[in-house]
Amino acid sequence: MHPEEPVRPTPADGQGSGLPGCHRHPERETGVSCTRCGRPICPECMVPASVGFQCPDCVRGEAAQQARQRPRTTAGALVALGDGALVTKVLIGINLLVFLLTEYVDQVWQIRLGMGSGADAFGTRIGVAAGPAEWYRLVSGMFVHAGVMHILMNMFSLWVLGPQLERVLGRWRFLALYLLSGVAGNAFGYLLDGADMFSVGASGAIFGLLGATAVLFRVNRVPMQPVIALLVVNLVLTFTLNNIDWRAHLGGLVAGVAIGAGMMYAPPGRRSLVQGLALGGAVAAILLMLLIGTARLPG
């Protein structure tokens, strides 16, 4: 008998075995106790341990305690024990699947999913300009690419920048950074040229990751020269090559810097509040750009 196990009552005639009932299922008699708390547990509640069995309550409590004791990053994310690049890989997979659909299965989907806005010959607004029902293009347009080189360059950049940020920010913060940077880039393009535009690609999100990486280097006091050089090269290409939407790049970059700063400079005592405000501010800025862009359209 376990030292802390309650004394088993002596059965009376016709009154069962006299064993205690499981603390979670009192109607089930049992002779086994949890090795941590000593409470009786039935076979359904037995969780194998290194010695004996534990009850589900103690197992959950131990897991929560271990989670609290795990070290956290500068952004408050638990240090990853497994694959620290899961979201990055999923995003690359989605981009590749959408590319196969829009490039080789049916190219009409490029128009259906692309970041487009304007008006037809009758003055009817189409795309994002048509209203909230078409705002899905702000997201879907991030996953459409024009040609093999376009997607290869963006996915290579995502693979280079993504895992490091994902491990620092955690999966959900990293996903929010990626999506909001890309959407902000598309919204900025709509703000400046919503009357007639069509844009595709993850470049706005990639520039957002680049901006957040610059913030990460600054926070950790890592020499900034490599990321600055990469940023300068990308900006030069953005403004010199044809068929590149510099507006999406610039909008994504600014969003990435702002969101990254809010996440990584947040004080530990108010981390959730500050990070929530950073994400909420990005959403508010996106909505403001959409409303102003729509108000500026002719007709």
Image (spheres, helix red, strand yellow):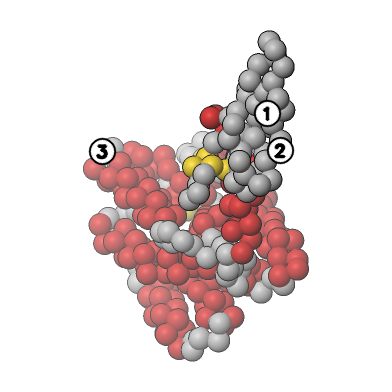
Q: CA separation, marks 1 and 3?
A: 66 Å
Q: Quadrant of the N terminus?
A: top right
Residue 105, label in figure = 3
> Does 259 sit above or below residue 115?
below
Q: Residues within 10 Å of mark 1 (few under 14, many from 20)?
A: many
Residue receiving disc 1: 20
Q: Dot 2 corresponds to which residue?
A: 6
Q: Amino acid at mark 3?
A: Val
Image position, residue 299 (x, y; %) = 63, 44
Asked whether residue 54 is in view, the answer is yes
User: Spatial distance from mark 2 to mark 1, Cα to Cα?
Assistant: 8 Å
Q: Residue at x 54, y 36 (%)?
A: 46
Disc 2 packing (10 Å; few <14; some 14–19; many ≥20):
few
Closer to the chain start, of discs 1 and 3, is 1
Amino acid bearing label 1 = Pro
Residue at 41% x, 39% y is 112
Residue type indicated by callout 2: Pro
Query: Mark 2 near mark 1, Cβ–Cβ under 8 Å?
Result: yes
